[in-house]
Image (spheres, rainbow, N blue to C red):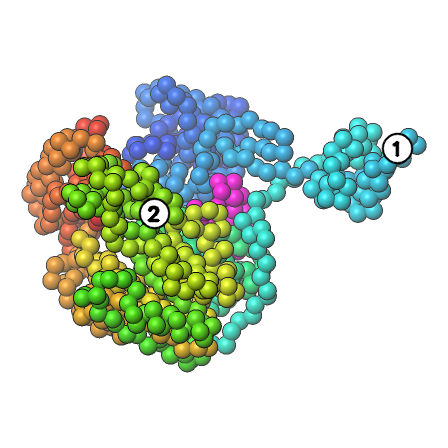
Amino acid sequence: MTTTETGHTQQNQTIADKQPVTVEVVVPLPLDTTFHYRVPEALANRIKPGLRVFVPFGRRKLTAYVLRFSTPPEGQQLRDLLDVLDPEPLWTEAELTFFHWIAEYYLHPLGEVLKTALPTGINLQSRNSSDGEAVSGGKKVRLERIFSALSADAPARLRGKGLDILAFLRQSGPVSTAELKARFGECSPNLRRLVELGLIRMNEREVYRDPFAGLTVAKDSPKPLTLHQQQALTTILTALDGNGFAPFLLHGITGSGKTEVYLQGIAHTLAAGRNALVLVPEISLTPQLVQRFRARFCDGIAVLHSALSDGERYDEWRRIRRGEVRIVIGARSAIFAPLERIGIIVVDEEHEASFKQSDGLRYNARDLALVRGQQEQAVVLLGSATPLITTRFAAQQGKLGYLSLPERVANRPLPATSIINTRMTAESPLSPQLIEALADNLERGEQSLLFLNRRGFASWLVCPACGADLQCPNCSVSLTYHRQRRKSLCHYCDYQVPAPCICPACGELELKEMGVGTERIEHELLERFPDARIARMDSDTTSGKGGHARILDKVGRGEVDILVGTQMIAKGHDFPGVTLVGVLQAEGSLYLPDFRATERTFQVLSQVIGRAGRGELPGRVLLQAMTPDHYGIAYAAEHDFERFYQEELLFRQELNYPPFGFLAAIKLSATSEKSLTTAAEQSATVLRAIKNRLGLRVEILGPAPAPLYRLRGRFRQQILLKDASRAALRRLLIAYRREQSLPATVRMAIDIDPVDLL
């Protein structure tokens, strides 16, 4: 990495003139301003833009990021920075341009953007070292000791294990401590003695923590393509050879081979000397996708997601920064990966809401992929079987290239789908038709998948005497009963009480179980099919490291007959042995107070339906619904995206929702309901005054309580802004930030292009 030419020139001139060097920095705090510091002469030769420095800030000391060499405002009293924390810059000039764009678009302080882009914990100030570890910028670097033989003659008194180790080192060359211990057992005293005698030398080298440890895959080769795959790939390769920005929607039905198109496009990119960035929405998708990529490309792959330890994530980040990696695969935070020479960016399952960060810097990695692709002059592939309405509309308007994969590979048919009306049958969550189909599948030795987007044993416990239910004291939700853990839990703040328990309102000793979750479905299946191998995949069963991969591997090896799970089983997994899919409570997300509720219902149903029949045997889907005629459910069962898209588009146009309008939300929260209400009303008054003064037409909705009114002990209200112009929203919000003064007890967040309105 290099600093800018301008920066070098200014630095050299200032040093030559013996004038103090000054730098402009930002700090990782919610402040929209920059700060100037003087560089002590002892540090002047080490300072560059893109480094972290240690600075005095008020009465404390913290990490800051150097933006540029600067001329401070005249008359300003400058303080000296204390230390330089990095030997080389952490980002390039192009990456800093990207971060500046993010800060401006999302109206978020640049210092916090840079902090978000760096590995977790890198700004810790501890710089102590310990045996076997060194500390680099607050993160421990793992060191490995390497021993090698010297040419000195061994004394005659050297015997036993020490002599054996020396002979081995002279024969084999440099060997690590771990290898020596594996061969000779505990030998640390022997090694120390050999070093003291001058017979061997000890060196240290840095080693990376390996998130792929224990993962072995067989070598894979490119698969033959269908006609539509080949047409899509040809278009992509032409765009890659053009070395310019080229965004595409790759709209392929489930099982149509989108991943193979990604792989062959990336292979072409690597051959041309450029690199690839692949974004996936969920950690649960990463193990299977990484295996496919490692089988095809072997080495040069890094992964970035929240399931890694801090040390693993830091090591992966450094591998990428040092240019040791050609492909980066990860969840939304991977959009910040310090990968240079990017030729292609893939956003798999581009419709997923999890690409949007819900707190702090509220960025959308899917949108930032397009921005970074434009800045890098790269090809960007947005892939999905159920693309966002806004993405499909952009392709229809010619803003994205449209690539279609309308058929499954090997001419496999889409699964036959039947809707079971459960409106009048509430006795059991499993309909007789579904039970019979599961029994038939078990008899044939085929795998089944059951989808219910609610974990736990029962949705809530209710008192049969007084009707009261167990409520979370911190959130506006009922506690979910988990029989296996013997607890009732809040899935938002993790508040929990032992269960069963007495009614808190009237003291009734027995509470009634209401609603169902994946744990109860698993329990019922075990009672009905005691010989079946049943597994459950939800947040409770995948919380440990590698939890997703363990379950997916068992399914892939055919060691599971029936897999029960939440939406994480619906997202892009390839289960060739699954021939039956059952969907329980298909309308579960249909009536949420969000204009995207129908779109999300259609997407999750289409995705889970697409898990059936991906292998040699045809698939079948039974979809249980109390509202079978709703277009979001009916079109999903018919595999008809286009008709759903046209109907949903009419609804959006009528109300000026995206893609016909743009949204921003002001989200306010406080522990005091009264202070929150006052602040929300004042904010709305200020917004309307600014709107009138600037002559804007922005529609201001609210303030209104958030549908989930209390969350983690804080009351929440929001104001929704809607307009046909992004520029108008931006003018209003910039003025609001400048003019609104909120009490310290009230938190305010601006959410540009909000995805979650709950």
- Can residue 17 be seen from the camera position used here? no
* Left or right of residue 70, residue 738 in this image: left
Residue wearing tag 2: 482
Q: Is residue 603 above or below residue 324?
A: below
Q: Which residues are magenta?
A: 304-327
- Quarter-of-image position of residue 194: top right
| Image position, residue 301 (x, y; %) | 53, 55
- Quarter-of-image position of residue 229: bottom left
Q: Residue at x 18, y 65 (%)?
A: 423
Q: Is residue 675 above or below residue 351?
A: above
Q: Residue at x 39, y 71 (%)?
A: 439
- Quarter-of-image position of residue 157: top right
Q: Secondary structure at mark 1?
A: loop
Other-residue count near label 2 (Cα within 10 Å), few / some / many at <14 / 14–19 / ≥20: many
Which of the two marks, 2 or 1, is nearer to us in this view? 2
| Image position, residue 348 (x, y; %) | 39, 61
Amino acid identity at mark 1: Leu
State the separation of the CA atoms marked 2 and 1. 65 Å
Amino acid identity at mark 2: His
Q: Nearer the viewer, residue 364 or 175?
A: 175
Q: Is residue 310 magenta?
A: yes
| Mark identifier at residue 158 | 1
Q: Nearer the viewer, residue 145 or 656?
A: 145
* Left or right of residue 445, residue 114 in this image: left
Q: Residue at x 83, y 29 (%)?
A: 197
| Image position, residue 119 (x, y; %) | 45, 41
Does label 2 or label 1 sit earlier along the sequence? Answer: 1
* Left or right of residue 346, residue 681 in this image: left
For this orientation, the residue located farthest to the right is: 156
Q: Residue at x 41, y 64 (%)?
A: 529
